[in-house]
């Protein structure tokens, strides 16, 4: 079973329908220089592995069309492939589209932090659009989102079955770990984004409790 991703320029689309429309405009065009470079690097790295460890279903160069690159790999390699795509795409100003989840992960305005999405794995950055999309949809089996700066400095949320959220942040040590229960997913998303961008002006308005273990 395969898992697909598509690379396209940042800002080329904002919705799944717009992605489809943009990709239709690229059909039949020769690969752009950026796309050709990324495809060549993917094929190179895939070729350096034993055949049983290949992460591409077919050569990436064969799926390079205009300013878009279609990448298909085995489902058990999705995390590896996604990380590699971010490595290649982000510095070139390219977004990663996941058609299975209908997620467009565009680097415009991103903050480079370690993000763990309980249902989908690891991501190398966060944007306001992503956190606002992800938080309301958190669900089993991993209804949590963690944004980590390292050194025990992170913010995280967990969505309970009744729809309320536990929001926690930690400032480097156990005595600087606080939690609050919230019911508004939009507020949770905005607080996570504000923390990510260094704005804690609304934090003082919340009834935080120090979390003890």
Image: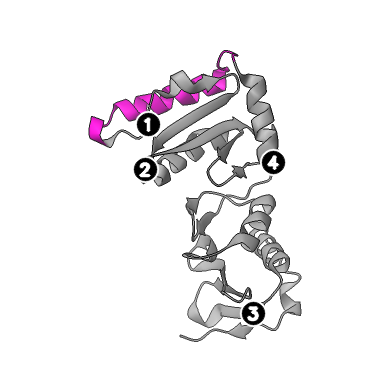
Q: CA distance from mark 1 to mark 4?
A: 26 Å
Q: Quarter-wise, where is residue 50 in the image?
A: top left
Which percent across, then down, holds residue 128? 69, 53
Q: Quarter-wise, where is residue 159 in the image?
A: bottom right
Going from N to C along the chain, the mark reached first, 1 or 2, is 1
Q: Is residue 46 magenta?
A: yes
Q: CA distance from mark 2 to mark 3?
A: 36 Å
Q: CA distance from mark 3 to mark 4?
A: 31 Å
* Viewport quadrant of the N terminus: top left
Any part of residue 39 in sight? yes
Which percent across, then down, holds residue 149? 53, 60
Query: Which residue is tagged 2?
Result: 77
Q: CA distance from mark 2 to mark 4?
A: 26 Å
Q: Secondary structure at mark 4?
A: loop
* Magenta span dominant secondary structure: helix
Q: In this picture, which residue range is highlighted in magenta?
A: 28-52
- Tag nearer the camera, 3 or 4: 4
- Label 4 neighbourhood size at 10 Å, few (<14), some (14-19), many (20+)? few
Query: Which residue is tagged 1?
Result: 56
User: Viewed as shown, does residue 40 lie left or right of 23?
Assistant: left
**Image position of 143 with respect to 94: above or below:** below
Query: Which residue is tagged 3?
Result: 181
**Which of the labelled discs sits on residue 15, or is there none?**
4
User: Viewed as shown, does residue 13 lie left or right of 87?
Assistant: right
Q: Secondary structure at mark 1?
A: loop
Q: Which is nearer the eye, 99 or 36?
A: 99
Q: CA distance from mark 3 to mark 1?
A: 43 Å
Q: Residue at x 51, y 39 (%)?
A: 86
Which percent across, then down, holds residue 197? 67, 57
Q: Which is nearer the eye, 118 or 3?
A: 3
């Amino acid at each position: 079973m395969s898992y697909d991703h598509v690379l396209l320029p940042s800002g080329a689309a904002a919705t799944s329908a717009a992605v489809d429309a943009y990709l239709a405009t690229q059909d039949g065009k020769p690969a752009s220089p950026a796309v050709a470079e990324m495809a060549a690097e993917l094929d190179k790295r895939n070729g350096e592995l034993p055949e049983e460890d290949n992460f591409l279903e077919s050569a990436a160069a064969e799926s390079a069309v205009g300013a878009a690159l279609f990448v298909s790999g085995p489902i058990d390699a999705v995390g590896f492939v996604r990380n590699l795509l971010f490595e290649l795409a982000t510095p070139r100003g390219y977004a990663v589209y996941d058609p299975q989840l209908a997620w467009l992960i565009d680097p415009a305005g991103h903050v480079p932090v370690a993000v763990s999405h309980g249902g989908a794995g690891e991501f190398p950055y966060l944007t306001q659009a992503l956190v606002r999309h992800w938080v309301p949809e958190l669900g089993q089996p991993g209804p949590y989102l963690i944004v980590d700066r390292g050194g025990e400095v992170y913010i995280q949320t967990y969505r309970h079955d009744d729809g309320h959220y536990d929001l926690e942040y930690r400032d480097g040590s156990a005595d600087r770990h606080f939690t609050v229960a919230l019911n508004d997913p939009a507020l949770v998303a905005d607080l996570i984004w504000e923390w990510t961008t260094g704005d804690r002006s609304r934090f003082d308005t919340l009834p935080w409790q120090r979390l003890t273990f």
